[in-house]
Image (cartoon, rainbow, N blue to C red):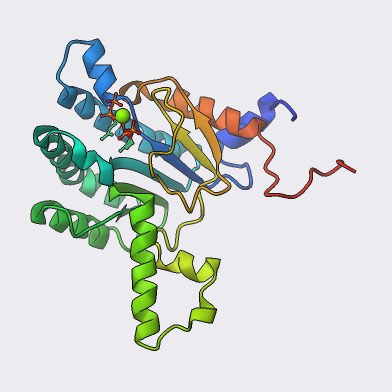
Amino acid sequence: MAAASASDVTNVVSGQQPGLSHVAIIMDGNGRWAKARGLPRAAGHERGVEALRRTVEAAGEIGIRYLTVFSFSTENWRRPAAEVNALFGLLKAYVQRDLARLTREGVRIRIIGQREGLPADVAALVDKAERTTADNSKFFLTIAFNYGGREEIARAARRMALAVEAGELKPDEIDETRLGHFLDTDMLPDPDLLIRTSGEYRLSNFLLWQCAYAELVFMDVLWPDFDRASLEEALAKYQERERRFGAVSPGAY
Ligand code: IPE
Ligand code: IPE
Ligand code: MG
């Protein structure tokens, strides 16, 4: 495996690296960040929103086109109601505060996950963010909220079954591409790079289908401390990888 040269990294950082268009992030470690400071967990989540703002800005400047972040999982309902409510409140506050600016900056916002389980006010705001930015195409910010990879695949299977029942789809036509169109991420390329912060080495049900060939980078930084330098560090690691997609390296024979 070749080490990245400075110019390779510069290429990635300037967005010129072919093949790096979609970065996905599991934003983890807010609670531990707060605990280390004797603060309530909600304070960690608040600082996590600031890290998200920084990261969206840095990703845009670097030339990344697609950024998908894990913000609330279908399993996060297991947390105390007060924490769940704080997380909903923060999503609302983020959209309310940043929507006008993101719209001006050409960001297209999409929320993936199960929409039905969301409180009505959150669902309405999410719809508004998607509608308002629907014509933008400079940068694609996708927020996984009430999202679980298995739930997404099960929901896609259910919709395909309904399409078969309605005579719109034949069982023989179901292949990887067709199934992909039934997922929430239809229209997004698969992530090239998946980053997880906070030193945990797991996917926690994030983009299970889509990350089949993503390069995984696990970092010790807690999400509220994540910044442009952290993103560049992850991109430099990505640059050191050789993506083979099951084939052999050129020169292996
Ligand atoms: C990530 O931080 C935010 C969500 C999962 C909603 P955590 O809240 O999981 O923080 P830790 O992992 O407990 O430190
Ligand atoms: C994953 O983090 C979900 C989000 C970052 C939104 P968790 O903190 O919920 O994951 P586990 O419980 O450590 O696997
Ligand atoms: Mg966590």
Quadrant of image for the C terminus:
top right
Q: Is residue 179 left or right of residue 104?
A: right
What residue lies at 42% left-to-right and 45% top-to-bottom? Answer: 67
Relative image position of residue 168 (x, y in whole percent): 40, 86
Residue drawn at x 15%, y 42% as measured from the top left: 88
Q: Where does the image place residue 13, in percent across and percent down from the top left?
A: 55, 33
The quarter in which the N terminus is drawn is top right
Res. 184 visible in picture = no
Judge left or right: residue 47 versus residue 125.
right
Q: 173 or 70: which is nearer to us?
A: 173
| Rendering quadrant holding ligand 1 | top left
Residue 60 picture location, percent across and down: 43, 41
Q: Is residue 12 left or right of residue 161?
A: right
At x 53%, y 68%, the residue is: 177
Residue ranking furthest to the bottom: 167
Q: Residue at x 34, y 26 (%)?
A: 223
Q: Quadrant of residue 108?
A: bottom left
Report the front residue among 110 and 33: 33
Seen in the picture, residue 205 relative to 32 is either above or below; the reply is below
